[in-house]
Amino acid sequence: MSNRTYSKMWADSHEVLHHLLEEELPSHETKPLADRTMIFQMLSAFYIKYVKIFRNMEDLYEQIVHPQKRRVVHHVLEGVMGRILELKNEMVKLEFSEFHYYDDILQDLKLTPEALEIPIPRYFLKDKVKVMKDREKILSRILSKSSIQVEKEASIRILTLDEAIHIIQVAERTRQGRLRSKFMLEIRMEEERERMAKQRSSSTMSTDVAATLIKKVWQGYRQRKKTKQERTEEMIFLDMEPTPDFQKPSAIQLQTEKMHQQRQVVQEVHEVEYQQALVTIKEQLHSVEGPDIKETLREQIRQWFVECRNVTGKFPDYPDAENGGSATLFASKTPQEVLQELAAKEEKKKQKAAEKKEKKSAKGKKEEKKKKKKGKADKEDEEEGWKMAPSQFLSTVAEGQRIYEEVWQNRDEHTNLAQKYVAELIKEDKRQEVEDEIRVQVDELMRQELKNLKIAVDRDKSTKKKGKKDGKKKKSKKGKKKKKGKDLTANRSAIPGINLVNHCLNHKDVFPQISRPKLYTIFQMWSYQSRYEPRRDGLELGREYNYLGTTLRQTDIEPMPSLSDVKQLITLYGILPLGSQAVHEKAPLVKSLMLAGPSGVGKEMLVHALCTETGANLFNLSSHNIAGKYPGKSGLQMMVHLVFKVARLLQPSVVWIDNAEKTFYKKVPKEEKGLDPKRLKKSLPSILKSLKSEDRVLIVGTTRRPFDAELKSFCRTFQKIVLIPRPDYTSRFVLWKTIIQQNGGILTHSLDMSSLAKITDGYTQGHLTQAAKDVLTERRIKQLHTKPLTAVEFIPPLARQEPVYQEEENSFKAWFVKTPLGKKRAKAATESENDGKEKGQKGKEGKKGKEAKKKGKKKK
């Protein structure tokens, strides 16, 4: 695609965004809505439109090479991301469900379900490539000093003489067995060759008969091959089968990919040039326009001195640098306004003492009034209906839209075919920066000049004011002191965060009774995903949609979410907030996330995919990982402090708690009492309170037995609970195709995928993957061209595994209904049923009354 194409795509996206902002930002106050169905339809329409804009903007940011345009696109992109999260939060509050279905709206907008897929911005990882490489180097260096030594010490074991002789004997017998089998194979092959030679010599077949047999076999083979080819061509012609080169990328695709790579290189070059231009243009403005700006500012400030002196009879106080210096006064206020402000300040000082006394006496009355007002307001809100909550991101989106319309919409770029930076725009931005820097220097000079004028003209008054001001400043400094939370590692360097852990590894003064291998356990919690291969397959496998979600809900049946729905929630609640600091600070804050589901549905894989897509550090605080480490109350306190301090310094970070039900056990089993699995239970609530919006730290729990945990404390800790079900038929159909191809298999007509997906009902992604690995061995892959795969081959390895039965899935559903969101959903469903019954009864009563009236009229 050319630059002109991307420019048109950018213009179209902003045109849609302009109409969308007009709908979301009406000129007058809208009336509250009462119809929940209409509200959900409106929110869903906004959500789908913003997702479409988000997809376009993400593509634009990756392919546009103009550095200044990319910044505008990035600004709008983050605003749209945040608005999507806000709309999702509103829909969850309205429907009391994490999963939503938009079948009817997609049909009205003539869109496919793929339009709902939220892309993961590629710049999340591109912008932090250098940081991740540096982190891997530091990790490998420290792990080489600690973990490898521990592993070597654990693996080396001194053998006795008998054990060593036994191992040598086993190896020697194995070697002799291999040689013996090799000799026997050669003997059998030789005997077979002799037998075949005797048969050839004893046969009396004529040459004509032999030629006829050969011809018959060859013609049969040739005809079967020709028939198969003609059948395949016919199916391709009817569009019932893909072409042979369907999986291979076409020439256009290869060319497009090559152009994309070239654009990435051009982006980097233009970005370097832009950064250099920022410095050079700023220096030019300093040297060329700086003296004129400096002189103009000095003349304006001196004029302000004179005007204030003429009006008030004294020189004004120069504004402090903290308040903005001279920029806050002389440019926007007249001397009369300054005099009025001074008089107002004096009046406020007199009123403060009286107000303090009144506040103490009236404090109790005000609290009672506030409570009454709140109760009335809540009742009024309930009566009035639903209103859209104020947005933190609409202003960001509107600002990006304004910049586009003012700067880029009508700009003529025929001369800038290379799409390099525009120097005029840089000058406009940097001119204000230069003026601010020069203003600081001018303020210092003019403060001294004002001081000299005061000494010369009104010396006595100035000394009194100075004494009063000094006293006030001292009092204000004393009043500003605040208590700070205790930092257990305040005396240690923690920048860039690695030195804190280095201290624990190199010094035993933290806990003298703990050995070095136990001190190393902080690294077993830190950067878990750095020691494993990145996982993206958790977000790619089985991405099939639930096409009957809306229909089932209309019949009061709650549909089980598909794997695509789960992926959407992981993206919305985990990847987008962790990937963008601006989005995390303003979007609805999600501090903790729970993934619940049966074994094998991919919970751990999703956690690794979450870290891979955002470049986050993974800390493993599972009960089995911290068992016996950092013992005692002080040890637990130090461990939690270290983990979350390093997590904040190396954000984004994910704190993973596997088998989270063990941390909230109702009753600890006897075999696990020694491990103390409930160590973190009391610490987690205080940890959640300490996490702020600027801390990109997410606590993720995974569990396959949530019903073993105390529900109240469990739900209080985990803010969002996502139930991951076993895959349905459509998901299994897609999963089988993907898994077989990933393990080296070839899909043919001999493999009945539909039947295979049907008979594997109850099996999870883990079961299917294990079965594919058992069948597609190295030997079987070599035989695929002569012996195609069949569905029967996968049944024996599946039969050896335990599936997820319907009873287990029902137990997960029953448990989820007891969670806070499940209770609200059930309550809303019962209320809607009661409303429907009342309406039905009223309708019946109305019909009876009408019939009675008709009968009365007939009698008359």
Image (cartoon, rainbow, N blue to C red):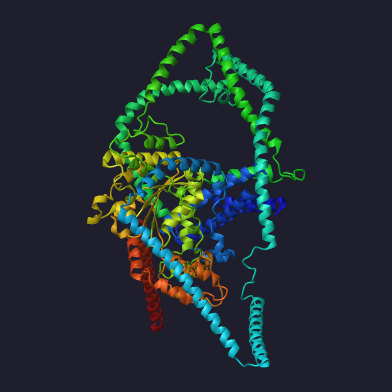
Q: Is residue 321 left or right of residue 648?
A: right
Query: With respect to residue 382, does 560 lie above or below?
Result: below
Quadrant (top left/top right/bottom left/bottom right) for the N terminus: bottom right
Q: Residue furthest left?
A: 670
Query: With respect to residue 685, does 208 lie above or below?
Result: below
Nearer-the-camera pick, 507 or 306: 507
Residue 39: where, in percent of width, then height? 48, 58
Nearer-the-camera pick, 180 or 810: 180
Q: Is residue 318 left or right of residue 250?
A: left
Q: Does the image show residue 686?
A: yes
Q: Residue furthest right?
A: 415
Question: Residue drawn 33% across and 69% down?
Answer: 807
Residue 420: where, in percent of width, then height? 71, 41
Q: Is residue 672 left or right of residue 332?
A: left
Q: In the rendered image, which quarter is residue 296 located in?
A: top right
Q: Does the image show residue 370?
A: no
Residue 728: where, in percent of width, then height? 45, 69
Question: Residue drawn 43% across and 15% down?
Answer: 470
Nearer-the-camera pick, 332 or 379: 332
Question: Residue drawn 48% across and 53% down?
Answer: 533
Nearer-the-camera pick, 3 or 804: 804
Give the number of callouts: 0
Query: With respect to residue 578, does 51 lie above or below?
Result: below
Quadrant (top left/top right/bottom left/bottom right) for the C terminus: bottom left
Residue 102: where, in percent of width, then height? 51, 63
Query: With respect to residue 29, does 779 lie above or below?
Result: below
Question: Residue drawn 39% across and 31% down?
Answer: 492
